[in-house]
């Protein structure tokens, strides 16, 4: 029998669940009930006995599962759960746990910074030299040179620097960046009170929240990815992923890969969003971002056809391909409507909405839900009096009111559907057994954001409980027995597929990174070799750095966790 707890801990007032589990097969006889467990303060002064309630057999983990609800314990402190001589990992109860968590998750983004040295006062012993300052060339010109249609000496050079490394690789991709930025900028939008603390970054102490300074580092890189026509390059990457060397040692030629309508639309949307968020703090930047968004929107108007992206054969850096740009275009139009109040943007977004089969997704491939956040922004904001720089404080049109109603219904319907998925899981995770994909933790966390959104629309306790359960899963209530955040919990993963961590010669892992998590269809050599066929999807996980399809880190796996943790630090 195994005991699983949220290794970070629980909020005093929130629901608290621990799991007892025993591996078995569906048809095996039901094992003997474990009976009672003791929830003990580590000081030994408090003890509560609770019955473990039988859930049944859980398909995703292949476990017989018993659930222990100990929500009645509210006193802050350190605890552990005991059962027949066995002890769980220790955990805390405290009201600041999620504040500390989202600070750590946000600080991790600083460690992804490219094009600047990370200095000791901010990076501690993870300080490192600058990287990727060399100019990039256009992939299209490189191809012409290869074909003998152009002289190498005539190639243009672009000094595009900065931004965050996307993941365990050193590539930079506007679509992935836009997704991460949307999660964080909306987290700030809806829960500004959560972001008052310091991140200890070079910009700390200025008259702007640190989280916005961190995001500005990424946005300023993104601005450079726009060309003169308003097109946006799909990625800035080397031909092949770097070896496992520190970023300063990766000196391969960087290329600007062709423009895609995906990158242009995502860029338009996120720049429009940024113009609203930064207006009170950085007016010049806000103007610049809005002008850039309008220019790229113009490009989209002139190029109504889908322009996707496929890696050229020689290239193995990230692809971030997609088969449709409808959701991206809807998001772009919606953000510009929110900035300008011009009705034609609303009409365009609504027309696309009516043709989409999914409208509530928050991922890099399907960005539809961000349009919903933009549309319902005022309603979703924590403090309705705090509508900074939007044009919606005036009465809204009938067309907008109608669209708002539709979108609210879509979000709430999806939340109800996911609540059913959650109750079908012994571990309380809103993921069906087939949904454990590459980056499954992102799906879990995106669903936590969906539950959070539903709560802001309709404050039902089941929605906050659902956010809590998703974070419990990420932080240790899972059949793989890991906390999926580095440095958080007694058994946190610590060997991410991250070039910096592997190459830095430091035993400690940079804290605050979220793992991609279990993948029922392992897609890297080491995982294919080590994971036995037939392993239950929730257990298809290894804390091994070579396993990039299980254990990489990315900016957009941290960002939804920042949103969910910010939510829980405000709505406890
Ligand atoms: O997160 C992406 C995942 O959903 C895809 O299945 C996978 C394969 O295409 O790619 C992932 O993205 C990777 C990106 O291409 C490059 N940087 C690292 C990303 C995380 O593994
Ligand atoms: Zn770099």
Image (tube, grey):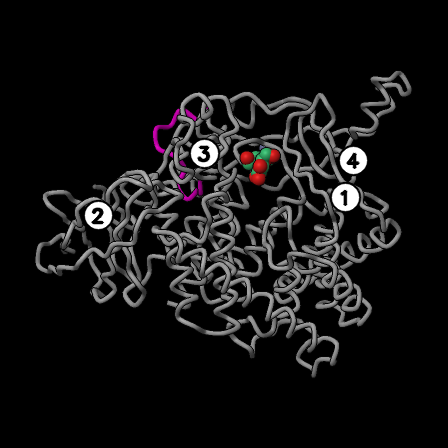
Q: How far apart are marks 4 and 3 (CA)?
A: 29 Å
Would you call the spot at circle 1 few (<14 residues within 10 Å), some (14-19), or many (20 or more)?
A: many
Q: Nearer the viewer, residue 201 or 462?
A: 462
- Ligand 2 visible in quadrant: top right
Check the image and name the residue furthest to the right: 149
Q: Distance between the residues labelled 1 and 3?
A: 30 Å
Query: Which marked residue is nearer to the observer: mark 4 or mark 3?
Result: 3
- State whether the magenta stretch is mostly helix, strand or loop: loop
The residue located at (41%, 52%) in the rendering is 429
Q: Name the residue under label 2.
A: 90
Q: What are the residue bounds of the magenta stretch? A: 503-515
Compared with residue 410, is residue 489 higher up or lower down, i.e. above or below? above
Q: Position of residue 406 (x, y in %)?
A: 65, 71
Q: Which of 434 and 411 is in front in this view?
A: 434
Numbered tag placed on residue 495 in the rendering: none
- Assess mark 4: CB under 8 A from ligand 1? no
Q: Which of 505 and 514 is in front in this view?
A: 514
Q: How far apart are marks 2 and 4 (CA)?
A: 50 Å
Specify which label sits upstream in the sequence, 2 or 4.
Answer: 2
**Res. 51 visible in picture:** yes
């Amino acid at each position: 029998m195994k005991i699983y707890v949220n290794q970070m801990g629980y909020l005093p007032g929130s629901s608290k669940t621990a799991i007892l589990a025993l591996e078995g097969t569906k048809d095996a006889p039901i094992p003997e009930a474990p009976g009672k467990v003791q929830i003990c303060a580590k000081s030994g002064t408090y003890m509560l006995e609770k019955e473990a309630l039988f859930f049944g057999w859980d398909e995703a983990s292949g476990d017989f599962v018993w659930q222990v609800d100990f929500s009645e314990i509210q006193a802050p402190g350190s605890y552990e759960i005991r059962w027949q001589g066995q002890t769980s990992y220790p955990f805390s109860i405290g009201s600041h746990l999620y504040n500390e968590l989202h600070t750590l998750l946000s600080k991790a983004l600083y460690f992804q910074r490219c094009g600047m040295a990370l200095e000791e006062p901010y990076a501690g012993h993870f300080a490192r030299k600058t990287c990727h300052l060399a100019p990039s060339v256009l992939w299209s010109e490189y191809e012409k040179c290869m074909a003998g249609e152009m002289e190498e000496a005539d190639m243009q050079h672009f000094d595009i620097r900065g931004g965050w490394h996307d993941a365990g690789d050193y590539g930079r991709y506007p679509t992935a960046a836009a997704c991460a930025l949307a999660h964080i900028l909306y987290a700030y939008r809806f829960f500004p009170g959560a972001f008052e603390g310091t991140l200890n970054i070079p910009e700390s102490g200025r008259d702007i929240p640190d989280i916005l300074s961190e995001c500005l580092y990424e946005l300023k890189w993104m601005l450079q990815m726009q060309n003169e026509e308003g097109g946006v390059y799909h990625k800035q990457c080397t031909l092949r992923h770097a070896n496992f060397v520190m970023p300063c040692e990766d000196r391969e030629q960087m290329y600007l890969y062709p423009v895609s309508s995906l990158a242009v639309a995502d860029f338009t949307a996120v720049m429009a969003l940024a113009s609203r968020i930064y207006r009170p703090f950085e007016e010049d930047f806000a103007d610049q971002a809005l002008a850039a968004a309008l220019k790229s929107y113009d490009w989209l108007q002139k190029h109504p056809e889908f322009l996707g992206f496929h890696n050229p054969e020689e290239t193995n850096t990230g692809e971030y391909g997609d088969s449709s740009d409808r959701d991206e275009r809807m998001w772009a139009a919606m953000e510009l409507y929110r900035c300008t109040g011009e009705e034609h943007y609303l009409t365009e977004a609504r027309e696309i909405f009516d043709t989409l089969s999914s409208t509530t997704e928050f991922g890099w491939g399907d960005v539809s839900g961000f349009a919903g956040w933009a549309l319902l922004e005022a309603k979703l904001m924590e403090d309705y009096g705090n509508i900074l720089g939007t044009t919606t404080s005036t009465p809204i049109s009938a067309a907008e009111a109608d669209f708002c109603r539709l979108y609210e219904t879509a979000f709430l319907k999806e939340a109800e559907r996911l609540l059913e998925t959650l109750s079908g899981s012994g571990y309380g995770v809103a993921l069906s057994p087939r949904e454990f994909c590459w980056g499954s933790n992102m799906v879990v966390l995106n669903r936590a954001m969906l539950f959070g959104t539903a709560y802001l629309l309709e404050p039902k306790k089941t929605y906050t409980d659902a956010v809590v359960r998703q974070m419990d899963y990420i932080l240790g209530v899972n059949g793989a027995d890991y906390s999926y955040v580095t440095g958080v919990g007694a058994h946190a993963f610590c060997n991410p597929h991250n070039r910096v961590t592997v190459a830095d010669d430091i035993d400690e892992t940079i804290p605050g990174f979220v793992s991609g998590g279990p993948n029922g269809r392992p897609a890297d050599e080491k995982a294919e070799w080590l994971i036995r066929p037939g392993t239950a999807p929730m257990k298809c996980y290894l804390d091994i750095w070579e396993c990039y399809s299980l254990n990489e880190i990315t900016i957009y796996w941290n960002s939804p966790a920042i949103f969910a943790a910010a939510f829980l630090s405000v709505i406890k």
